[in-house]
Amino acid sequence: MMRDSYADRHRHPPLLESAEIVVALVLMSACWLAWYVARERYHLTSRQLAELATYLIIMVSALTGTAVLCTGGNCSCMHSQKTPGQEPIRG
């Protein structure tokens, strides 16, 4: 007689075999290393690093939002500019 957890093993892979967990650990390690190097090597204060991190988060959010909104040719800002001699794009 098998236990339920053994039979269910193939449906739920171990935690470290999950790609999302590995990517998250790598990103967290890279952020920690960057923070450590900035503090120890470049002598930045925690307040300066927090400000820099805030600017980076805003930039990444803006770029991600722009990419999401402008995928698939649905971006009106790219099609609104007319070049001389071209018919307007109809869609």
Image: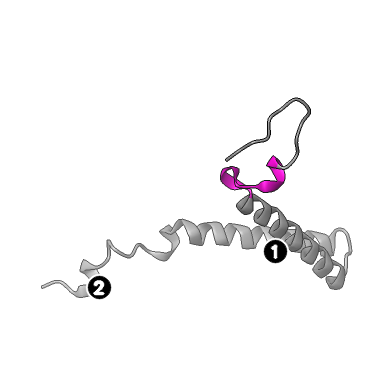
Q: Is residue 13 left or right of residue 43?
A: left
Q: Residues within 10 Å of mark 1 (few under 14, many from 20)?
A: few
In magenta, the rendered stretch is: 70-79
Residue occupied by mark 2: 5
Looking at this view, name the residue that lies furthest to the left: 1
Q: Which kind of residue does numbered mark 1 sit on? A: Trp
Query: Is 74 situated above or below 14?
Result: above
| Vertical side of 77 occupied by 43: above or below | below
Residue at 46% over, 56% down: 19
For label 1, the SS is helix
Location of residue 90 in the rendering, given as x and y in whole percent from the top left corner? 61, 38
Quarter of the image where one finds residue 3: bottom left
Q: Which residue is mark 1?
A: 32
Q: Identify the amino acid type marked 2.
A: Ser
Crowding around mark 2 (Cα neighbors within 10 Å: few <14, some 14 to 19, many 20+) is: few
- Residue 40 place in picture, x, y as percent: 83, 63
Q: Any magenta on residue 84?
A: no
Comparing 67 with 91, the one in front is 91
Q: Quadrant of residue 11?
A: bottom left
Q: What colouring method underlies this structural image?
A: one colour
CA gap, disc 2 and disc 1: 36 Å
Our reading of the magenta stretch's main secondary structure is: helix
Would residue 71 be counted in the magenta stretch? yes
Depth check, front residue: 67 or 11: 67
Q: Which residue is at a point 70% across and 63% down the rendered structure image?
A: 32
Place of residue 86 in the rendered image (x, y in percent of width and height, measured from the top left): 71, 27
The quarter in which the C terminus is drawn is top right
| Horizontal and vertical percent position of residue 17 | 41, 58
Q: Secondary structure at mark 2?
A: helix
